[in-house]
């Protein structure tokens, strides 16, 4: 069994953390008795929020592109290829977006009392992240279903 350090990477793997501007050594310096220090947690949270934005932007542009193809191009004979692209973009939005929001939820749960008692901390604790995760998944599923219905000529009634 391979030992994994506090930032989720195998030790001596040569991989760097996903926190821009920080090395594995500097991230590990922030760890103290298995408790993540506030600066590392905040930096990781902001990184994951930024990544969530990038995931949503990418999935939305892909789905906008497939919608344009379905609505304005002759898709005869290419339905399966377009359907795979639609489903793949939708799954990317659902799964990758959910993972990023799940990480933000976990990091929020690790906030210490001092951070929770700030205005930012109270606001973050009050955010209904599980509801955001559910709504995001429902929206992507609806977009995918609608595009597939348009692609295969089925109209919603």
Image (cartoon, rainbow, N blue to C red):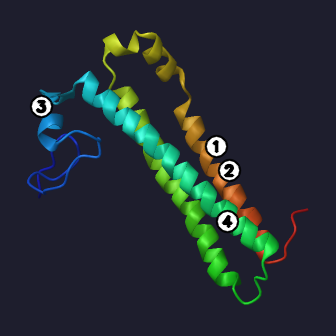
Query: What numbered label is drawn on residue 139?
Result: 2
- Residues at marks 2 and 4 touching, judged by CB atoms closer than 8 Å: no
Q: Position of residue 126 (x, y in %)?
A: 53, 20
Secondary structure type for disc 2: helix
Residue 146 vs 27, above or below: the answer is below
Select label 4 or label 3 by which is in front: 4
From the image, tell me which residue sits under label 4.
65
Going by the image, does 8 lie left or right of 139?
left
Q: Which residue is mark 3?
A: 29
Gap in angstroms between the C-alphas marked 4 and 3: 44 Å
Which of pointers 4 and 1 lies earlier in the amino acid sequence? 4
Expressed as whole percent of the image width and height from the top left, the position of residue 113 reads 33, 13
Extreme residue in the front direction: 21
| Residue 127 higher or lower than 60, as above or below | above
Residue 56 coordinates in the image, percent (x, y): 56, 49
Q: In the rendered image, which quarter contains the C terminus?
A: bottom right
Marks 1/2 in contact by CB < 8 Å: the verdict is yes
Q: Quote the CA–CA distance across marks 1 and 2.
A: 6 Å
Q: How far apart in space, not on screen, are marks 2 and 4 (Cα)?
A: 17 Å
How much space separates mark 1 and mark 3, taking CA atoms? 37 Å
For the residues labelled 4 and 1, the Cα–Cα distance comes to 22 Å
Mark 3 secondary-structure assignment: helix
User: Disc 1 marks which residue?
Assistant: 135
**Residue shown at 47% from the left, 54% from the top:** 96
Total marks shown come to 4
């Amino acid at each position: 069994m391979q030992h994994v350090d506090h930032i989720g990477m195998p030790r001596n793997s040569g991989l760097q953390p996903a926190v821009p501007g920080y090395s594995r050594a500097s991230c590990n310096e922030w760890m103290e008795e298995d408790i993540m220090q506030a600066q590392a947690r905040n930096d990781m949270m902001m990184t994951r929020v930024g990544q969530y934005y990038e995931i949503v932007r990418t999935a939305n542009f892909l789905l906008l592109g497939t919608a344009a193809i379905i609505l304005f191009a002759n898709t005869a004979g290419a339905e399966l290829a377009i359907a795979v692209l639609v489903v793949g973009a939708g799954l990317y939005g659902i799964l990758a977006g959910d993972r990023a929001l799940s990480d933000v939820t976990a990091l929020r749960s690790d906030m210490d009392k001092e951070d929770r008692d700030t205005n930012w901390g109270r606001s973050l604790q009050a955010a209904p992240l599980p509801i955001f995760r559910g709504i995001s998944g429902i929206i992507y599923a609806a977009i995918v279903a609608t595009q597939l219905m348009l692609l295969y000529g089925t109209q919603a009634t």
